[in-house]
Image: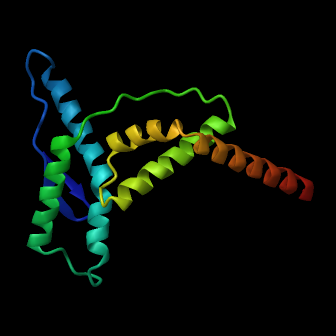
């Protein structure tokens, strides 16, 4: 299977095959979803690689091969995540999730790693347990509420 990121094409293997555990249609749907997820998660790599080129210049064959190696390595580690439908009880919980996602993505970038949704989800859970995250969320919500009150007063 191939995915296209900007004007570049990269190869993916079909990880899911028809057999006793899924039908041909299911295997095709899983492989398509896998390709879309990887394409969305890896897009930034290609954008960053192209950003340093002069306008109109294309990536070299070596650069494309290096990206293909990174995409293949990412694909070999990729796992689908179970979607959790979260019931947010209020602005604090919602803000805690925002803070945790930002911290997780920042930590992965600082480590020079691509944003890997599996890792982001793991780090979010880790950060949610930190008391300082809860306190930061409370401060942000209070600030937002104050700004909303001030904006309403201006109307």
Q: Quadrant of the N terminus?
A: top left
Q: Is residue 78 left or right of residue 15?
A: right
Residue 105: image location, x then y, percent? 42, 52
Total marks placed: 0
Residue at position x 29%, y 43% from top? Answer: 37
Residue 57: image location, x then y, percent? 22, 81
Residue at position x 68%, y 33% from top? Answer: 90
Residue 111: image location, x then y, percent? 33, 58
Taking 84 as reference, is 148 above or below it?
below
Taking 114 as reference, is 135 above or below it?
above
Check the image and tell me how it is coloured. rainbow
Q: Is residue 87 left or right of residue 42?
A: right
- Residue nearest the viewer, comparing 58 with 76: 76
Taking 49 as reference, is 37 above or below it?
above
Q: Is residue 92 left or right of residue 37?
A: right
Q: Residue furthest top?
A: 20
- Residue nearest the viewer, comparing 60 with 129: 129
Q: Residue furthest front?
A: 131
Residue at position x 31%, y 66% from top? Answer: 47
Residue at position x 17%, y 62% from top? Answer: 67
Image quadrant assignment for residue 76: top left
Residue 53: image location, x then y, percent? 26, 80
- Residue nearest the viewer, comparing 101 with 68: 101
Q: Quadrant of the C terminus?
A: bottom right
Image quadrant assignment for residue 89: top right
């Amino acid at each position: 299977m191939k995915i296209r990121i900007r004007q570049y094409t990269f190869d993916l293997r079909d990880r899911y095959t028809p057999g006793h555990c899924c039908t041909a249609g299911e295997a095709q749907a899983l492989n398509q979803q896998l390709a879309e997820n990887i394409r969305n998660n890896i897009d930034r790599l290609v954008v960053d690689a192209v950003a340093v080129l002069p306008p109109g210049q294309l990536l070299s064959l070596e650069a494309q091969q290096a990206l293909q190696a990174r995409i293949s390595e990412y694909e070999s580690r990729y796992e689908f995540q179970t979607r959790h439908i979260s019931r947010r009880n209020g602005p604090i919980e919602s803000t805690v999730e925002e803070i945790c996602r930002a911290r997780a993505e920042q930590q992965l970038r600082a480590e020079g790693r691509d944003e890997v949704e599996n890792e982001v989800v793991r780090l979010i859970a880790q950060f949610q347990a930190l008391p300082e995250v809860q306190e930061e969320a409370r401060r942000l919500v209070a600030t937002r509420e104050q700004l909303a009150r001030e904006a309403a007063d201006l109307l």
